[in-house]
Amino acid sequence: MTSEAPNGGARMPRWLYAGLIASLAVNLLFVGSLGGAFLHQRHGKPHGMSMRGGEDAGLLGFVRKLPKDKQPAIREQVKTARENLKPLREASSEAWLAGNKVLSEEPFDQEKVKAAFARMTEAETKLKMAIGDILSSMAAQLTPDERQMLSEWREMRKPRKKH
């Protein structure tokens, strides 16, 4: 026995509405969990880092752990270093893209690929050496305890190997 809706069609039972809402809630929970896991995997930060990014991202997050009197000078040094690293980061990224482009060209030219990869490696090495110079310069201003904190901070941030 079904009752008629005002427009002449059969009306859905109330339990069906509750079931649809519950199903929607479960689906949203599932999709939200997947989305959160994807974002964490792709953009996740190691424990102890700011999720705000920007000012607190990277080495500036470590600077906040230093004594208040040291923070301003080292913060400025890090900000200046970031600006100085931008061209090296861009060169590394461009060399990677160029290497990848050469890799997919036909006909395949192994010497051309090796040369592109050599330029990529050189750009990455320059970037890593500049970062090492910045870290060693900063470490020279720290006490032994603060250098230990820097070492632990770096250990926490090391890339995880995916095999």
Image (cartoon, rainbow, N blue to C red):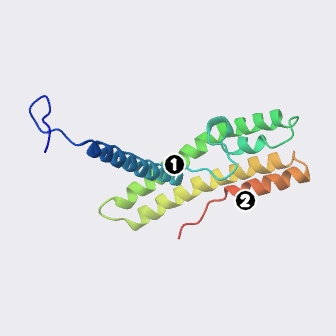
- Mark 2–mark 1 Cα distance, whole angstroms, equals 25 Å
Quadrant of residue 71 in the image? top right
Q: Mark 1 highlights which residue? A: 93
Q: Is residue 79 left or right of residue 7?
A: right
Residue plotted at (76% across, 49% down)? 135
Q: Position of residue 94 (x, y in %)?
A: 49, 47
Label 1 environment density (alpha carbons within 10 Å; few <14, some 14–19, many ≥20):
some
Q: How many marks?
A: 2
Residue pushed farthest top?
Answer: 6
Three-letter code, disc 1: Ser
Residue plotted at (64% across, 53% down)? 46
Q: Which badge, 2 or 1, comes first in the chain's sequence?
A: 1
Label 2 environment density (alpha carbons within 10 Å; few <14, some 14–19, many ≥20):
few
Residue plotted at (80% across, 38% down)? 74
Q: Position of residue 125 (x, y in %)?
A: 62, 56
Q: Is residue 87 left or right of residue 31?
A: right
The residue lying toward the viewer, choosing from 163 and 109, is 163
Quadrant of residue 77 in the image? top right
Q: Mark 2 highlights which residue? A: 155
Residue pushed farthest bottom?
Answer: 163
Disc 2 is placed on an element classified as helix
Q: Position of residue 123 (x, y in %)?
A: 58, 52
Q: Is residue 161 left or right of residue 109?
A: right
Q: Quadrant of the N terminus?
A: top left
The residue lying toward the viewer, choosing from 132 and 62, is 62
Relative to 96, is 20 above or below? Answer: above
Residue plotted at (77% across, 41% down)? 63
The residue lying toward the viewer, choosing from 18 and 43, is 18
Q: Position of residue 54 (x, y in %)?
A: 62, 36
Disc 1 is placed on an element classified as helix
- Nearer to us: label 2 or label 1: 2
